[in-house]
Image (cartoon, rainbow, N blue to C red):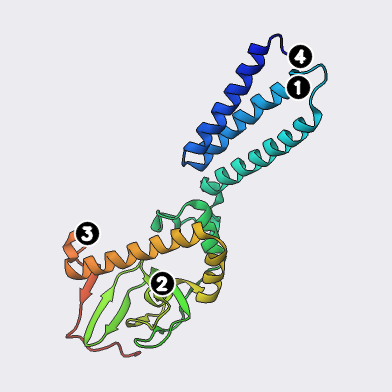
Amino acid sequence: MLGTDLGAQTIVYVAGAFYVAGLIVINQIALRLLILAGTTFYLIYYFNVAEEPLWEAIYISSLILIANIIGILSLLAKKSRFAIPKAYADIYPLMPLLPPGDFRALMKHASRYSLKEPKKVTTEGMPGSKLYFVISGNTEVHKGDSRFTLSPHVFLGEVAFLIDDISSASTWLPAGAEVLEWQFSELRHHADRNLRFRLALDAVLSVDLARKVATGIAPSAYGQPHSLVDSSCQAAPSSL
């Protein structure tokens, strides 16, 4: 039992201060840690405020504390690089905007393979159904009367995915190219269930689009003058 009413009041005030501070901060981990501290002080109060511990309040506060600890561990796991699948560890540096947990979720729905023969990936003016990320190999792009080549480490089909519309260009990949492939339907289903995943994926695809536009206008801006090579005077590949 607490020695004085002042001591009991102090513990309650400290616990309440941690709760209020937790509700003010935006960072989820900091918020949960503050709530955890507040709950701990409430438990101390419930154990000592009366002749007998207030067991009902202790049980409920203990459940809150356990649930909070589980939430903290879950958040830490999503941010940890241990969440990155070993099979895709070489891909993660190419998508730094994705937190490890969201990257893991994205890779869960991906198929990784190398092309044994040239493949037409998207068709201009036609609805798309798959999103691609080119790991290796150049992409031949036909957009209207323009012809150019994209270097690896770009998404294909992202315009159709983002705005749920027709593909903006026709693209081909050569034999030997390595890609990641996702079905639109699977990605949208997961994004509809997880807002954080949707926002992270939209950000990655939007940055990819912005880089393509900026590089197409001024290739030297990124210090990679050949990342987008205009080949409008070249004939289409024999495989087209």
Instruction: Give above or below for 112 relative to 81.
Output: below
Amino acid type of the residue that numbered disc 4 sits on in the rendered structure? Met
Q: Nearer the viewer, mark 1 or mark 3?
A: 1
Q: Residues within 10 Å of mark 3 (few under 14, many from 20)?
A: few
Residue where numbered disc 3 is placed:
222
State the image coordinates of residue 2 (x, y, percent, origin top left). 72, 13
Q: Is residue 46 left or right of residue 11?
A: right
Q: Residues within 10 Å of mark 2 (few under 14, many from 20)?
A: some
Task: Please name the residue shown 40% across and 54% down the image.
Answer: 97
Determine which quarter of the picture holds residue 155. Answer: bottom left
Q: Residues within 10 Å of mark 4 (few under 14, many from 20)?
A: some
Q: Do the CB atoms of the residues marked 2 and 3 lie less than 8 Å apart?
A: no
Name the foreground residue: 200 vs 169: 200
Q: Do the CB atoms of the residues marked 1 and 2 lie less than 8 Å apart?
A: no
Quadrant occupied by the N terminus: top right
Upstream in the sequence, badge 2 or badge 3?
2
**SS for dot 4:** loop
Per the model, the C-alpha gap separating discs 4 and 2 is 61 Å
Residue where numbered disc 4 is placed:
1
The numbered mark at residue 47 is 1
